[in-house]
Amino acid sequence: MQPERLLIVTAVEAEAAAVRAGVQASGVHPDTVVVAPVGVGPAAAAAGTARLLTLAEAAGTPYRAVLSAGIAGGFPGRAVVGATVLGARTIAADLGAEAPDGFLPVDQLGFGSNLLEADPALRKTLTAALPAAIVGDILTLATVTGTAQTADILQTRHPRAVAEAMEGYGVACAAQLAGVPFAEIRTISNPIGPRDRAAWRLPEAFSALTEAVAAACG
Ligand SMILES: O=C(O)c1cccc(C(=O)CC[C@H]2O[C@@H](n3cnc4c(=O)[nH]cnc43)[C@H](O)[C@@H]2O)c1
């Protein structure tokens, strides 16, 4: 009988490579962790994760948990480049309606929730394995924030948000549907604010991701 496996979902192959290096460094049996890049954005993340969870369930080998992992933007003053962040909650920050008075999230519109909690037991395990990690909300957006104005609006609207990325809420929706525990782990590649792609510190963020995964799996 196969041991229960952990699924780690990333957006792009470079993130998956950093995660695989962490799994290898942790010393766990490689068959116990599956790492899959499923695409950029919440739709690709939800569809790709749902497919993997469903295939595993149909084969009689369901995953014990699913992690959304990768790099992220950090809110200034809350998470610096190179930091590791653990999501207490994943929030679909642009899922809703714009109104003259401001943004209305889907829960205020009566269409479900734009917020999903990380699994408490999984979160506890990850927090213990990563004592230096910053725990807070991680926003999911289909569009990378690229102005100081949007960064300010998001930071004010989400006082407990430490980072933004593009996949967590999609992975969380797929996990919830399948009844599989979910958590999100990210390392910061860039500050959230005016777009400056040259300032993204990808090697630093990928190294931090490898280290975080090694500690989390070990
Ligand atoms: O150059 C761009 O603007 C760009 C647009 C889409 C994706 C990328 C990636 O490099 C994909 C990797 C992954 O990185 C996450 N990420 C990193 N920083 C941020 C951010 O400031 N805001 C939102 N997401 C971020 C995201 O999850 C991407 O899928 C580059």
Image (cartoon, grey):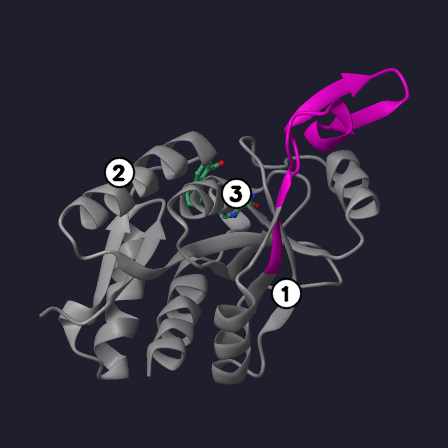
Callouts 2 and 3 close, C-beta under 8 Å: no
Of 41 and 149, the residue lying toward us? 41
Check the image and report above or below for 170 versus 191. above
Q: Which of the numbered marks, if any, corresponds to residue 123?
A: none
Report, in whole angstroms, how far the alpha carbon at label 2 lies from the one at label 3.
Answer: 16 Å
Check the image and report above or below for 30 versus 161. below
**Would you say 170 lies left or right of 108 here?**
left
> Which residues, given as a range, are shown in magenta?
88-115
Report, in whole angstroms, how far the alpha carbon at label 3 lies from the one at label 1.
Answer: 22 Å
Query: Residue beneath label 3, please?
Result: 169
Query: Residue beneath label 1, please?
Result: 80
Q: Quadrant of the N terminus?
A: bottom left
Looking at the rendered image, the disc whose residue lies closer to the viewer, 2 or 3, is 2
Residue type (three-letter) at the residue carrying disc 2: Arg
Quarter where residue 52 is shown: top left
> Which secondary structure lies at badge 1?
loop
Please name the residue shown 64% across and 35% down the image. Answer: 146
Asked if residue 108 is among those painted magenta in the image, a careful observer would answer yes
Query: Residue beneath label 2, please?
Result: 51
Looking at the rendered image, the disc whose residue lies closer to the viewer, 3 or 1, is 3
